[in-house]
Amino acid sequence: MTRFLLRRSVQALFVLLALAAVLYAVFYLAPGDPARLACGPKCSVAQVQQVRTQMGLDDPVYAQFWHFLRGIVAGHTYSTGTGALHCPAPCLGQSYRTGELVTSIVGEKLPATASLALGAMVLWLIIGVGTGLVSALRRGGIVERLLTAFTLVGVATPVFITGILLLLVFCAWLQWLPYPSYVPLTDDPQQWAWNLLLPWLALALVEAAKYARLTRSSLLETLAEDHIRTFRAYGVGERAIVRRHALRGALAPVIALSALDLGTIFGGALLTETLFGIPGLGQQLVQSVQLKDLPVIVGIVLVMGLAVVVANALADVLYALADRRVVLR
Amino acid sequence: MPHLPLVSHRTSTRIGVIVVGLALAGGTAACGPKSGGGAKAADASPHRGGTLYVLNNQAQEDFDPARLYTSGGGNVPSLVYRTLTTRNRADGAAGSKVVPDLATDTGEPSQNATVWTYHLKDGLTYEDGTPITTADIKYDIERSFAPELSGGAPYLRDWLVGAAGYQGPYKDPKGLSAIQTPDAKTIVFHLNKPEGEFPLLATQTSFAPVPKAKDTGVNYAEHPVSSGPYRVVKNENNGEHLVLVRNPHWSAATDSQRKAYPDTIDVQSGLDQAVIDQRLSAGVGKDADAVTTDTNLGPAELAKITGDKNLASRVGTGHFGYTDYIAFNPKVKPFDNIKVREAIAYAVNRTTVINAQGGSSLNEPATTFLPPQASFGYTPYDPFPAGATGNPAKAKELLKEAGYPNGLTVSLTHDVTKGDEQGPEVATAIQEALKLAGITVKLDGQEHNAFSDKVHDLKTEPGFFLAGWGADWPSGGPFLGPIFDGRQIVSGGSNFNNAQLDDPAVNNEIDAINKITDLKAAAVRWGALDKKIGEQALTVPLYHPVYKRLFGKNIRNVVISDWTGVLDISQVAVK
């Protein structure tokens, strides 16, 4: 296990470094000049140049990347005009646009995104796996058909439609819930959950169908395997077969898929974030891409990358726990 | 049936499209005399107290007075920052006037309007009770030159004597010699040419005071020192969530413009536009005390208000001076031929263009470059009367005269952002209209930043593209100058004179009008100049946007000026 973690950590480090290097390399190929965008459309050439110097964009790309790497290890000190702003290691740089430290931007946005992603995942696993199990065990029944229809509608409706409908029904018509506004978990756990309920649901409904289908087919497949038939032949009860033996094998692919989805949602739940006014990484990333705010883009992409890497490592561990045939290396 | 989310209500805050964009993050939508529900709501007498909620799409970014690019001081910013002059807080055309704010008058011009002198009112203090001085106003202007605090309006750099190379007080503490403060209450500006509209520029937040001892450079926006009726107690995520409470040291006795009825103002941004409309329309709980300053009605609400009087009475209609147009670069063939440009002007179908942008309730057809408001000097004219749907027959005739009896093929450059004013919907509408006149239009769609880079750089400027222009203040000067003044043709990516017009007669007339300090007299001349330039078919004006924005059930005293086009937060009451 220690070897596994060590190996994965080294791998993760290389993946993240490669990600950052690629971003720096392709950044200048995209249209738009960050200095001009920060300066404003009517800035003169001389003014844009002043801003460019201020941002450190005069240096060659490799020097900027080196600067970035050094900041991660050794930190940086920036000028605020009137004083100095120290950015302790690991320093991811300073926003071109606002001068804010990237670590504090990510620190502000990450809790909201993590709250959204983790909560939604719990919900989609409950809805998806639950529906999948019921439909596998009660094949052909009315419950199966209803649940399948429900999840299909969920996945076929884009999140901005589901979201706006949920808001209309629960906030405007029934008035059971307030229009969501993000409350940090540390401020008020109850309000945190209450305000995130609809965004979780909107996201979960979209994802759940996928999990229902996967759970269903995977469970049916496992139930048809030889060792299950052997258990049956020994007279083990159906309930125990499903609970003790089949489920474990059937859930392995579900775990793997969750890990991937969680990583994606960390940076890609833009529509849900916008619709429900959640100040998360997705919104920030899109805004930063429009303004070509490279340090912030790199910071967020690194966090997303880290989420994917960690989630995958976690999935591998869970996979091994679920299916004893898998060995961690 | 709920409305679908809109990708594209127009907001006035599109970066890179208009100069005024950033300015109005606080909003833009005004009502003239036509305002639907505004007048009715204004009848209910307003009272102090309560919390006003502002639900916006765009964040109030860079809340530093040196960085804000505002028209008339902005909407939210003007609650915190008082300026030498400000916009008159009145409905419609009366709201286009400039009035004194910190200063005793709108400025005393001398030496042919190249020197402007202001005196501060008595008893002006910051939120901590310390007195406001003219040195602090000079200091904020100097800060606006610092590359650390980029983003503000460029005028002072061009206008102040010897300011072109100045890099702000952090790098150059000696300051700007063109601004003198002989005493704590007097400030004198020395300009390098006559500028009769200087009082209108003095409404921008760079003319707000910033006490040097409290300046924290790039961090100032988090806790600015207020000179207005409210102070900032919370500024989260770079203006995404602002909470303002009363500034106990502000006095209505020195401020005739801001009413400041609510005790607290809570500005929440980053919200989806469809959700903003849904919330204001439903008006559940706190949303009854809410307004938006940047989100137009969506199709669902637009459809609903025709049959729902209650909802219709909660729509504020406003006009901000803005024109969307087709731009020509006559240096590119065949647009060097005026007949070709005229043919396109005749062939354009403004009805389909307007439908592509949300329909006739959100846009008015344009035939003049200047917006249809008196303060701009609006003079109605239509040199190429195409009617509402275009005149392809006349266009064909002109093409024949131009030497293209069999029609021609041209390329139209546009932004690929869906719903954008320069976006694919408008481009397609133009393509179809021109087809009827025998003009085949190839669409050249560009990514947002690439589009802006391409059309504003003299080296890459195409011959035929979509453009839009908004005013930094409601006058012909900032409207016609950047687009048609030959001295404002600039290389390096910030050229807005799309026709690259350098006509001595036009340049001289602009100089002559800039000398006039009587703004009404100047407006007449701007109107006449617009008409004269319009005859050259260097642009084809398409439409002027109209703002229609909902406000909550409890909102009173809705005032929408023609300056900003949106309801003025400083006037609104929730009780």
Image: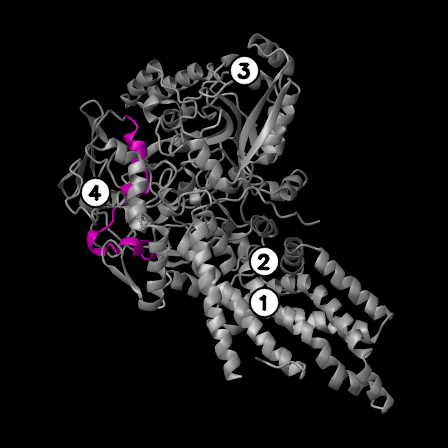
Q: Chain of mark 2?
A: A
Instruction: Find disc 2 in the rendering and name its residue.
Output: A272
Q: Which residue is mark 1?
A: A262
The extreme left residue here reads: B182
Which label was assigned to residue B542?
none
Give percent across and percent down for residue A115: 54, 68
Range of magenta residues: B196-224
Magenta span includes B194: no
The reply, left or right, for residue B255 in relation to residue A232 is: left
Quadrant of residue A218 within the rendered picture: bottom right
Element type where label 3 sits in the image:
helix
The chain containing the residue under callout 3 comes to: B
Q: Are marks 4 and 2 in contact (CB under 8 Å)?
A: no
Residue A303 position within the rendered picture, expressed as x and y whole percent measured from the top left: 47, 64
Residue B282 visible to the viewer: yes
Mark 2 lies on a secondary structure that is: helix
Identified at 57% across, 76% down, the residue is A314
